[in-house]
Image: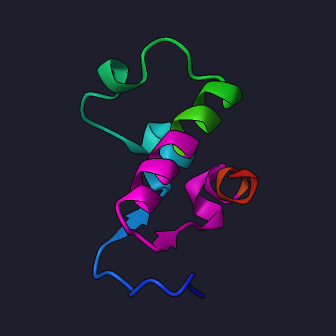
Amino acid sequence: MTDGAPLTPIGLGLAALGRPAYITAGRDDDLGSDRGVEAMRGRAHAMLDAAWARGIRFIDAARSYGRAEEFLGSW
């Protein structure tokens, strides 16, 4: 379902946002020391806001992506 905007060929996968251990290279630099749920949720929401603002309407979340479904649902 879209808001009337055309679908884009680019999507956003939430694996690395919902399950940060999924990121293998450079995650310590990217995530810093705060890996609590609230910090992760805030980063996921910021990324979703940025993607939406740029016209991305396909978002991939799955149970195996840690908290990705939860973060998408709360966004």
x and y percent of residue 72 in the render? 65, 57
x and y percent of residue 11 in the render? 37, 71
| Vertical position of residue 57 compared to residue 18: above or below | below
For the residue pair 51 and 38, the one nearer the viewer reads as: 51
Quadrant of the image containing the N terminus: bottom right
x and y percent of residue 75 in the render? 68, 52
x and y percent of residue 64 in the render? 59, 61
Residue 51 sits in which quadrant? bottom left
The structure residue drawn at horizontal position 57% and vertical position 81%, both measured from the top left corner, is 3
The structure residue drawn at horizontal position 42% and vertical position 57%, both measured from the top left corner, is 53
| Vertical position of residue 27 compared to residue 15: above or below | above
Q: Is residue 42 visible?
A: yes
The structure residue drawn at horizontal position 63% and vertical position 37%, both measured from the top left corner, is 41
Residue at the top extreme?
Answer: 33
Q: Is-magenta flag for residue 63?
A: yes
Q: Is-magenta flag for residue 4?
A: no
The magenta region covers: 45-69
The structure residue drawn at horizontal position 35% and vertical position 20%, both measured from the top left corner, is 28
Q: Is residue 5 left or right of residue 69?
A: left
